[in-house]
Image (cartoon, coloured by chain):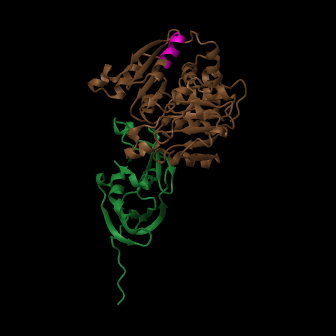
Chain colours: A green, B brown
Amino acid sequence: MKEPKQLSVSAIQNGTVIDHIPANNLFKVIQILRLDHIDSQITFGTNLESKKLGRKAIIKISDKYFEDDDINRIALVAPDAKLNIIRDYEVVEKKVVVVPDFIVGIAKCVNPKCITNFEHVTTRFKVVSKKNVSLKCYYCEKITNQENMQIF
Amino acid sequence: MILNNAEKPNRATIMKNRSLVSIDDLTTDEVLRILDLAGEFEINPVQKLLDGKVIATLFFEPSTRTRLSFESAISRLGGKIVGFSDANCSSVSKGETLHDTIRMVNSYCDLIVMRHPVEGSARFASEIATVPVINAGDGANQHPTQTLLDMYSIRKTQGTLDNLNIFMVGDLKYGRTVHSLVMAMSRWNTTFNFISPEELSMPDEFKLYLENLNLKYYEHSDFTEIISKADIIYMTRVQKERFSDPIEYEKVKNVYVLKNSMLRNTKPNMRILHPLPRVNEIHTDVDSNPKAYYFEQALNGVYTRQAILCSVLGVK
């Protein structure tokens, strides 16, 4: 018997769906977008099967739309994420995450001797590689790459 | 953008009130302008161009050459020095943050010269200060005034910066002077020869940087065979504490020692540079060889720093 097709995470009427998040970075995405600080109804699923990512996560946020600059902040942890903008249960727009040229805050510099790890300094990075995201610290000039990236 | 002559900034204003934190902060023209100006100071070192100016020299960690040559440069220019040469003599020992120290010192002086063990500290200070900041070394990161004096020494001894074959010997992994010099000299079609033990080889990021510029570099573990090709030999110290295995250090410790007998077949124009302090990597029998240039190089530091001080203050 054929299995019935059903949604792992229930549909929303209006809002934003963020799909194709690597499962292990779901909570980092929640943290970066500060979803734990908003009042909207949020549902998420994780460890869902994905041909591309192996295991993926998905977040559905009701009645919330993001500015591009805000959403691009998740590029560090979910560069392949796709956004569906939902109005009245219909996808009215699709967006992809674009890795920005500069990253302010969000990530920690990997260099333990960097000033940003000693004093209250907002981290600033130039994105030197967008494919496997790697960041050059504006202060100590050392490279932080995806493997050793820590999100605040 | 093309500027007509009336709009072109003159030499005295082009760097005015701009901090010097990293060698990459300078355009090629600005580098050459500083080297030209250093040449003028070599001919006429005592010029009271900083009369009435107060320069803060903040050395949060010990330094001999850099601090003394900066203070000598300031004195020859008629400037006054305030500062400290040891963080224990400052409020840092009471727990003051760098942020607060810079905010405070900023109001006492026209320029800050700073050495600090934490990487990126000079860039941070330059954001807080309203006066220019000159980085006199921030941990293992940048030491741009050393790079400029190295370049001054190279141009002075070779007559050019173009198409030179530069040998870098010793600790190429941790040495900030060699990293900055590679970045700076890559603007002049330089061929690099990197000679080091495997554990201390030039990091990949710098090799990749050269590859992207289509510049030639070669790596060796010994340099006796190829030394005859060098225009500049830039020696650095191989430190025992850099090795995870002390046996490895014992194996290589004598490979990277330059002796006078090795200089027999070297080019007449070849000169030996070293950022100093030297321990045993250049045998003292090299000192009397006319190709040994490291003490003159240290003297060039004064002229170069005079040029840098005047450039950032816009007084020449």
Say which residue appears at 59% left-offset and 10% top-offset: B47
Decide which of A109, B271 is in the foreground and name it.
B271
Decide which of B12, A75 is in the foreground and name it.
B12
Q: Residue B208: percent from the left, percent from the top?
A: 56, 49
Say which residue appears at 41% left-offset and 22% top-offset: B58
Decide which of B24, A60 is in the foreground and name it.
B24
Q: Is residue B169 above or below residue A128?
A: above
Q: Quadrant of residue B294?
A: top right
Count of all numbered marks drawn on residues in the image: 0
The magenta region covers: B69-78
Most distant residue in the bottom direction: A1
Q: Main secondary structure of the magenta part?
A: helix
Q: Is residue B2 visible?
A: yes
Q: Quadrant of the N terminus of chain A?
A: bottom left
Q: Residue A127: percent from the left, percent from the top?
A: 49, 48
Most distant residue in the right direction: B4
Q: Is residue B17 magenta?
A: no
Q: Quadrant of residue B42?
A: top right
Most distant residue in the left direction: B94
Q: Is residue B71 magenta?
A: yes
Q: Is residue A88 above or below residue B213?
A: below
Q: Residue B222: percent from the left, percent from the top?
A: 55, 44
Q: Residue A37: percent from the left, percent from the top?
A: 29, 51
Q: Is residue B177 above or below residue B208?
A: above
Q: Using residue A47 as the reference point, say whether residue B42 is left or right of it.
A: right
